[in-house]
Image: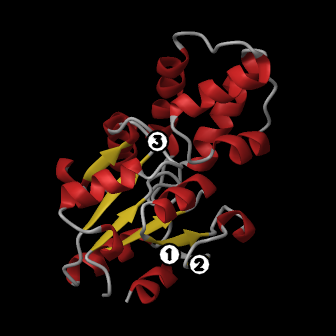
Amino acid sequence: MRYDLVLFDNDGVLVDSEPVSNRLLAGYLTELGHETSYEDSIRDYMGSAMHRIHDTVLERTGQRLPAEFDDEFHARVFAAFERELKPVPGVADVLRQLADAEVPFCVASSGSHERIRVGHRAAGLGRWFDDARIFSAEDVGRGKPAPDLFLHAARSMGVAPERCAVVEDSPLGVQAGIAAGMDVYGFTGMTPPERLAGAKALFPTMGELAALLA
């Protein structure tokens, strides 16, 4: 394959968590008096680190989310993950193909380390990602769309940015990958293609990814 490292976003790319987490986020924000539909949550927060949710609500309403917001939201999400989370269809085959071709890969996610690990365990993907291949927005000062997370992951894995491919499904992630100087492949399984403008290529199913990376 043409790359020395493939960096996967987590939510919506490795684990099919976006429907679960955005349903719960919309419900929780609405409970707190910030009327939010599922569609609003997908549009405004998909691919975001938690601080972006706080910043957006404060900017729009002048009100801060409660101090316990993150802990309560994560508790709801983790409980739902244990009940219903599944891997994105076809992604295990992609990981197997990369491993067989001896192409290193890692995860670089806006989610917390705990969220990543809970999701991987629930979806049966834990075997593919040891601690050395998990990178979170918690590790850097700025989350996506800043390039910091992708650059940190590449540096930690010992690979130059121009030798990296990023697999993303959110506009913020595509922006971050481009800003990092990496080739970005946009997964349109849940995201309208026009929202991933700038990606090197777009693909609707995971079965197409290996050929794009070759």
Q: Residue at x 45, y 59 (%)?
A: 87
Q: Is residue 6 left or right of residue 83?
A: left
Element on which disc 3 rests = loop
Element on which disc 2 rests = strand
Q: Where does residue 176 sit, x and y in percent of width and height?
A: 50, 56
- Answer whether labels 1 and 2 touch (C-beta < 8 Å): yes
Label 2 belongs to which residue?
A: 203
Q: Where does residue 48 sit, x and y in percent of width and height?
A: 56, 42
Disc 2 marks a residue whose amino acid type is Phe
Front position among marks 1 and 2 = 2
Q: CA distance from mark 3 to mark 2?
A: 24 Å
What numbered label is drawn on residue 197?
A: none
Quarter of the picture holding the N terminus: bottom left
150 w.r.t. 79: above or below = below
Q: Is residue 63 left or right of residue 49?
A: right
Q: Is residue 38 left or right of residue 166?
A: right
Label 3 belongs to which residue?
A: 143
Label 1 belongs to which residue?
A: 206
Q: Residue at x 28, y 78 (%)?
A: 98
Camera-side residue of 139 and 119: 139
Disc 3 marks a residue whose amino acid type is Gly
156 w.r.t. 90: above or below = above
